[in-house]
Image (cartoon, rainbow, N blue to C red):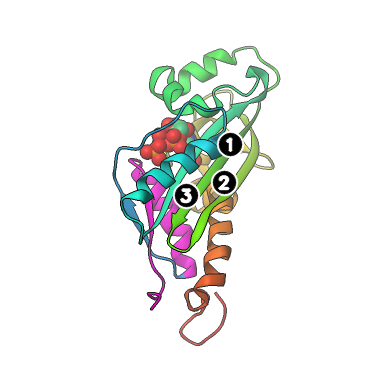
Amino acid sequence: MRSANPPIWLATGNKQKVDEAKAILEKYGIPVRQLNIVKTEIQSFSLEDVARYASEQISESSKQRLLAVEDSGLFVSSLNGFPGPYSSYVHKTLGVQGVLQLLANQHDRRAVFQCALALSGPGFRTKIFTGTVPGRIASRAEGSSGFGFDPIFIPNGARLTFAESGRDVKNKYSHRALAFRKLAAWYGKRWPSSHLSPNGALK
Ligand code: ITT
């Protein structure tokens, strides 16, 4: 028998990603668990390929779980999309200040955050859900909420960085929120009871 509302196991070392995923998915009655495991990250320009490979590989050893891997990146227009798939490495080496320095005196500050979310599990082929949020790189780092490049990313239509506006606002617009909401829609078709409130209304 299919278990009721099985959890999504998110394989990541980044606890804040898990907290964001929980805030989004638990509204739809979808439980989220962190699987803190070392992933194999292939060298690829495609976030999708990186996420898919890791998800399928981890899923090999726990086939009954719904296993998700998410790979995100910041793509800066005037740097021809850099750091993109290298965002994690660039964040560790240059950091937020290093990216600001690369853009010193640069008028074009457009950038997008992209997320590719791969979901593997029993009875279906790996699904990919994507999300993109366009925005710009701030002139200086502002705010203390969130993680990574949040202090320098301002989504289109906003004046504050994701780190200033806080998690609730970020979770309305972010690349991750868009991808996880697509996952929620897919999940709701397979486990419809997850999307129902106790009174039977749709969440
Ligand atoms: P896992 O690979 O273990 O999931 P990670 O933090 O390394 O965790 P990614 O490879 O997906 O995650 O992210 C690449 C980098 O992009 C990461 O180091 C962050 O600095 C940055 N990043 C990703 N999502 C972000 C977000 O929502 N806000 C700000 N920065 C983000």
Q: Mark yes or no: residue 145 visible.
A: no
- What's the residue at 47%, 64% (across, down)? 123
**First of labels 2, 3 by sequence position:** 3
Task: Indicate the secondary structure of the residue bearing disc 2.
Answer: loop
Q: Is mark 1 within 8 Å of ligand 1?
A: yes
Q: Residue tagged by mark 2?
A: 174
Do the CB atoms of the residues marked 1 and 2 lie less than 8 Å apart? yes
Q: Local crowd at mark 3 within 10 Å, few (<14), some, or many (≥20)?
A: some
Image-quadrant location for residue 110: top right
**In the image, 100: left or right of 11?**
right
Q: Residue tagged by mark 1?
A: 113
Task: Indicate the secondary structure of the residue bearing disc 1.
Answer: strand
Q: Is mark 2 within 8 Å of ligand 1?
A: yes
Quadrant occupied by the C terminus: bottom right
The picture places residue 75, in percent across and down from the top left corner, at 60, 28
**In the image, 91: left or right of 78?**
left
Q: Amino acid at mark 3?
A: Arg
**In the image, 89: left or right of 84?**
left
- What's the residue at 36%, 49% (across, down)? 60
Establish if 41 lies above or below 191.
above
Magenta region: which residues?
A: 1-28
